Amino acid sequence: QEAGPRPILVQSLHITNGTEFDYNKSIVDQRNGIKALQESKKPFPYLALGDSALGVGDQANLDRAAKALEPLVTRAKADGAALVLMGHGNEHLDVKSYRDFAEAMNKMYGHPVFLGLVEGSPELDDVMADLEKAKVRKVLLAPFMLVAGDHAKNDMAGDEEDSWANQFKGKGIEVQIELKGLGSLDAWADIYVERLKALDTAMKK
């Protein structure tokens, strides 16, 4: 505001439009509702929020995100392993886009991909049941999160007995770990850049 009226674009780095995304959206919407008697006195011409990576979970967004994970699938195939992704999820909303994304991955690559969440459903027990049903004996375990932080290092790959890696091993499943977040994939980072460019174009119309 001190520099003069200007548009402000806020780009979410979330994976889905979950509770934290909705919280941010409510803040942006409130600030964007600031009115002035004169149009020229508004704090900014417009304030807008770009969607998360999966957005509203339409097929185009799901396929775009699935394509970005091709390096992970390629590694899993080369190792003869199923790909297991750990997402964050949330306790309050049923984010259907997680399940739809796993379905899009399986359809695109024809290779077994399983996705479980730290919070919400599908949870680890669901993944375990699916692996047993598919008779999977080897997995590549990777975070479906922007960065490989505490959840990835401890809940997923930690030394504790209840980590995902050790629980899989306890079931006789060989485990390989990819301890890198989605942000390390250029194609995933490109999704957010595309979101931002599309938002800027839309707001200028």
Image: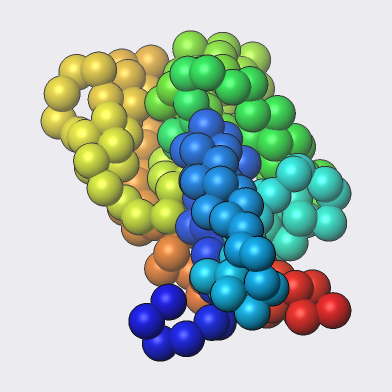
Name the colouring of the figure.
rainbow
Q: On the image, which quarter does residue 16 sit in? A: top right
Residue under the point 23% across and 41% down? 150
The quadrant holding residue 106 is top right
Residue drawn at x 52%, y 32% as measured from the top left: 19
Residue sticking out furthest to the bottom: 3
| Whether residue 197 can be seen here | yes
Q: Is residue 137 visible?
A: no
**Quadrant location of the C terminus?**
bottom right
Q: Position of residue 170 (x, y in %)?
A: 31, 17
Q: Position of residue 180 (x, y in %)?
A: 35, 58
Percent position of residue 24, x then y: 50, 46
Residue visible at 47% across and 86% down? 4
Q: Residue at the front extreme?
A: 37
Q: Is residue 115 left or right of residue 146?
A: right
Near-viewer residue (164 or 101): 101
Q: Residue furthest left?
A: 159
- Could you tell me which quadrant the N terminus lies in? bottom left
Q: Which residue occupies 36% across, 37% down?
A: 175
Image quadrant in which you'd find residue 51: bottom right
Image label count? 0
Image position of 181 (left or right of 161):
right
Q: In the displayed structure, does residue 173 sit left or right of residue 129?
A: left
User: Residue 162, image x and y in percent?
Assistant: 25, 17
